[in-house]
Image (cartoon, grey):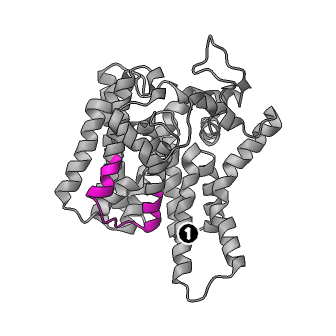
Amino acid sequence: MSMDKKSLLIPIIIFAVFAGLYLSITIYNKNDLLFRPVWDIDHYRSIAEEGYVARPCDPARDYPMGEVCGNVGWFPAWPAAVRILSLGQVRSGMMVLPYLFSFLGFIIFYNILRRLSNDKAALIGTIALAATPTAFYFLTGFPYSLMLFLFGAYLYYLYTSKARGRAYMLPLLAFFISLSYPSAFIMAIIPMVMLVNHYRKTVLRPHWQTVTKDIAYYILPFALGPLILSLYFYIKFDDFLLMLHFQEKYDRQWGFPLTVIRQSLKHFQFQSDAHFMESVHTCFLANFTILWYGLIFFIFFPYRIKPELTAYFVALYLFSPATGSAISIWRHFILLFPAAMIIAVSPRPRWIKLAYIALGLLLALFIYYPKFMKGYLI
């Protein structure tokens, strides 16, 4: 990936405007929720400061109730990165490091898209990324800024055959990704589709040893994170399936994703959502998120990004509803990074692209971020 002034200056300006906009709104409203360890962020903080803790649920302090409480439902890569890079100053690191990883993520994202398409697409795609309705989560203590950075870094090494250290960095990055977020393993579909397309283009059928080697190199690292974490839980807490047992109290049950989406759009409420503050608001926001990303499938077809990125977009879009609930989907879908790429390289007229990007920004500024500052976006 060749680097010049444009490859740095443009994404830096976009990030500066993006971060400056949300910081300005935050300061103007005298609201500090963007920097506080709210909701899951506090669990990441506790992991970074104290390590993993599993204990029986206490009605006086835990909600929802279940058999297992503590912080064992969250993945370790982000708290580990915060603890190491902040030199133990976890609370400060939780506020500062999201800006660093987002900053680097914007630069890598711009240059990946520039390489896959052209300068105009890179500009539009990076703006689309910043204008995503809930892009402000990149600036919070959630692991989404780290995920953006890892996603970009992985694509760089995947698409740069002569990159220095590629042989080691690809599986290492895949392993870190798998330790970062529950749905991160779905990124394995990117190299998987690449391999399938490669085998299809070869004249001779690939030997089974070659296929096995490729699977071990490209696919297996995406599964290692959850497996190793489960093994750690087995050693420390005598429960290999502790993460699943922890999640039982959230009443997530597997379902057909299109049925779940249809029910959400039809009824605007899931039974489990009724337990949360401002349930009506959050249900509408979940549906706005489903529609905003879902319409990209139809408005910007045909997709001119690589098929493996389209496959990842489709798989991740369906994964969260497949758990039976749309709660928190407004931040789960932030990992749909190819959405911005699809908009950027679409054959649709530029005014349609800019209008859709503007719609995302308007949703962010007038609906999602105000609700976030009021503490409604769990």
- Taking depth in this image into account, of 37 and 307 the one nearest to the observer is 307
Residue 285, horizontal then vertical, whole percent: 34, 33
Amino acid carrying mark 1 in the image: Ala
The question of residue 268 being in magenta is answered with no
Q: Which residue is drawn at 33% across and 24% down?
A: 27
- Taking depth in this image into account, of 319 and 331 the one nearest to the observer is 319
Q: Give the range drawn in magenta.
A: 293-313
User: Does residue 197 appear to the left or right of 167 in the view shown?
Assistant: left
Residue 1 in sight: no
Residue denoted by label 1: 163
Residue 300, horizontal then vertical, whole percent: 28, 59
Labels in figure, total: 1
CA neighbours of label 1 inside 10 A, class few (<14), some (14 to 19), many (20+): few
Residue 112 in sight: yes
Residue 311, horizontal then vertical, whole percent: 46, 61
Determine the main secondary structure of the stretch shown in magenta.
helix
For this orientation, the residue located farthest to the bottom is: 203
Q: Residue at x 51, y 83 (%)?
A: 201
Q: Which residue is drawn at 33% across and 56% down?
A: 297
User: Does residue 113 appear to the left or right of 323 in the view shown?
Assistant: left
- Taking depth in this image into account, of 259 and 341 the one nearest to the observer is 259
Residue 304, horizontal then vertical, whole percent: 34, 67
Q: Quarter of the image holding residue 21?
A: top left
- The image shows residue 150, relative to residue 72, as above or below, that is below
User: Does residue 348 appear to the left or right of 216 in the view shown?
Assistant: left
Q: Quarter of the image holding residue 29?
A: top left
Q: Is mark 1 on a helix, strand or loop?
A: loop
